Image: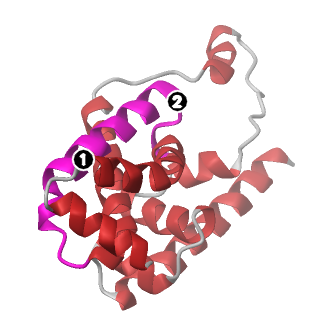
Amino acid sequence: MIVINRLVKKAQKGDEKAYITLFQQYEADIYRMAFVYVKNQEDALEIVQETAYKSFTEIKTLKNPEYFKTWLIRIAINTALSHLSKGKKVVHLRPEYAETFSTNEKDVSLQITLQDLIERLNETEKSVVLLKYYEDHTMKEIASILDMPLGTVKTTLYRSLDKLRVQMKREDMYEQ
């Protein structure tokens, strides 16, 4: 942790090598988080690059060097959400569902995965669930990353899990 704090302080003074060393330590985490949101390699890599640029230009605004990773992940999430909101005007048809619309069969059962269910959550709910269960962050860390009160994070997580349970039960009924 001491090494990270020193690197952050050097990067804040304009040391590019220190910044690159720092960013590379968390690049894989940022990519994973971005990929979960955008679901394709090309867009996830674009988000990683954009996060690198934004964080480099804004590193002087980071007040507590020990929260560098939290700050970086928050930038990545915001960048991914921004990317998704730009793309919402286009409706993409998933290839696995395309054949459903090209046939006249009325009784087509679709396999719903957990990822599909998570996609049905709103952006805040999705962020909390992903940070908790995909990235193993504590509730306190999630509150810091998303800049939300701890109570709100807990409420959001429990509400999201209830929604997922209801959706899974509903999908189970359709499959029987």
Q: Which x, y percent locates residue 5?
A: 33, 74
What amino acid type is highlighted by mark number 1? Glu
- What residue is disc 1 on? 16
Q: Earlier in the sequence, mark 2 or mark 1?
A: 1
Q: CA distance from mark 2 to mark 1?
A: 29 Å
Residue, far bottom = 151
Q: Please say if the residues under marks 2 and 1 sit with CB atoms less than 8 Å apart.
A: no
> Which residue does the image show at 35% across and 45% down from the upper left?
80
Q: Kindly report the secondary structure that dominates the magenta region of the rendered protein.
A: helix
Side (left or right) of 120 relative to 60:
right
- What residue is disc 2 on? 40
Side (left or right) of 10 relative to 1:
left
> Which residue does the image show at 61% across and 61% down from the upper left?
134
Q: Quadrant of residue 123?
A: bottom left
Is residue 43 in the magenta section? yes
Residue, far top = 102
Is residue 158 in the magenta section? no
Let me know if residue 126 appears in the view: yes
